[in-house]
Amino acid sequence: MSLIGLLRKNNKKRRQDFRQSVYLHAAQDLRYRLVLLISIILIHSLAMVLFEEMDWWQAFWLSMTSASTTGYGDISAATFWGQAATIILIYGIGIALLAQIASDYIELRLQKKEMRIKGRMEWDQMQDHLLIINTPKYYTERYLERLISQICDSPELQQTPIQILTPHFPDGLPMSLRSHGVVHHTGDATTEGMLEAAGAQRAKYIIVLSPDSQENSSDSKVFDILHRLKAIDTNAFVIAEAVEDNNRKRFRSARADAVIRPIRAYPEMLVRSLIAPGTEQVLEDLFRYQGDHTIRLDVHIEGKTWGEIVTTLIQHDIGTALGYVGENKMVTTHPQTSEVVKVNSLIILVNDDQVLPSTQVIKDYFQ
C-alpha cells in the first residue's frame, strides 16, 4: 500500500474512532445528568416531607411539577426552608438540568441516526440475515439495485434482512437501496474484527463479491475474506465470485459453498444459486461450449405432445429438450408435458462430446 493510501486509511479509522468515542461520551453524560436530576428530585422531596410535613407522594408530585415548570398550584411550599429548598434545588438546578437532559437526548438521537445512516453502528439484533461483502468497482449503485430487487422479488428471500459490508458508502446508502430496508456497515472485510461487526457469525447467507470483475488480483482479497469467515466459524451458506476459474478449488477449500464467475449483467444468477445451490454450475455451463451447452436443432414436428418429444430425444441419446421455436418465431421454454406443440426448431442441451444423427434421421424418429 502506498504512503498516501496508508495515511488515508489511518485518517479514516481515526474519524470512525472519534465518532464512536463522541457518541459514547455523549451517552455517558446523559446518564450522569439523569442520575443527578433523580437525586435532586429525591432530595427536594425529602425536604418537603421534613419542612412542609407532606407525605411522600405529595412531596414527589410537587418536585416533579416544579422541575417540569408545569406549576399546577394545587400544592406549594409555605415555610421559609421549604421555599428556600425549592429555589435552590428546583429553580436553581433542577429546571436547568432537565433542559440540558432534553437537549442531550435529542443530540444523542441525531448522532445515532447519523451513525446508522453512515454505517458506523453495529446491528447487534440482526440475525439470519443476508450479508453482502464488497461492492463492484464500476456501476456500483446500479448493480446493487438489481441484485437487491431480485432478492426482494424472490419468495424464498423476501423476509430475509439484508446488510452490506463495504467502504464505498461512507455518507450513507442510496435511497434506492434504503427503501428496500437494506442497512450497511462501513468498513473493509479484511480489517480485523470487521466481519464480526457486520454479524457474519449470525448470518444465514453470505455473498462475497469480487471488487473488480476484470482484475485477477481481486481473487486474493476474496480468498482472504473466505479464510476469515472460516476462522469465525459461521454456519452461513457462502457464495463467492472468482475471476480466475483456477481459483475455484481454493475458494471451496477455504470456506465457499458455491463459486461463480462475476456476471454483472445478470445478478439473478447469483440469487438463484442462493435459493437452489448447484444451479450456478448449470447456468454457467450454458454460456460456454465446453461441457453441457445448448444447440438449436432445425426440425419440423407437428401433432406431438411436449412429453413425447422430450422422451423421444432422451431415448435416442440426442439430448434434453429445453424449449422450442414455434411458427411465430417465439421461443417457448418448458411447456406442459401434455401440450401438443408445433415445432419449427428445438433448443436442446447436449454434451460437448455428443454425436448427433442427421436432421433427417431425427425427423424419422417422430414419424
Image (cartoon, rainbow, N blue to C red):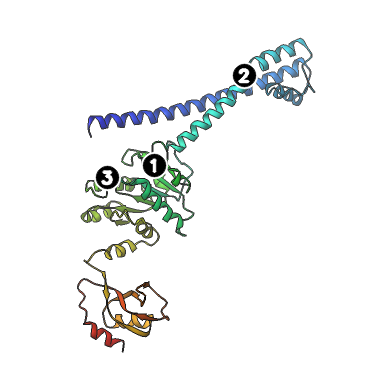
Q: Position of residue 321 (x, y in %)?
A: 32, 76
Rendered residue at 47%/34% (across/down): 114
The residue identified by callout 3 is 221
Element class at badge 2: helix
Around disc 1, counting alpha carbons within 10 Å, would you say few (fewer than 14), some (14 to 19), or many (20 or more)?
Answer: some
Kindly indicate the quadrant of the structure image that contains residue 171.
top left
Q: Is residue 221 visible?
A: yes
3 or 1: mark nearer the eye: 3
- Say if 141 sits above or below 361 in the image: above
Q: Is 38 in front, or is 281?
A: 281
Element class at badge 3: helix
Tell me whether circle 3 and circle 1 mark residues in contact (CB < 8 Å).
no
In the rendered structure, which amino acid carries the disc numbered 1?
Glu
Around disc 3, counting alpha carbons within 10 Å, would you say few (fewer than 14), some (14 to 19), or many (20 or more)?
Answer: some
- Say if 55 sits above or below 307 in the image: above
The numbered mark, 3 or 2, whose residue comes first in the sequence reads: 2
Q: Position of residue 76 (x, y in %)?
A: 77, 18
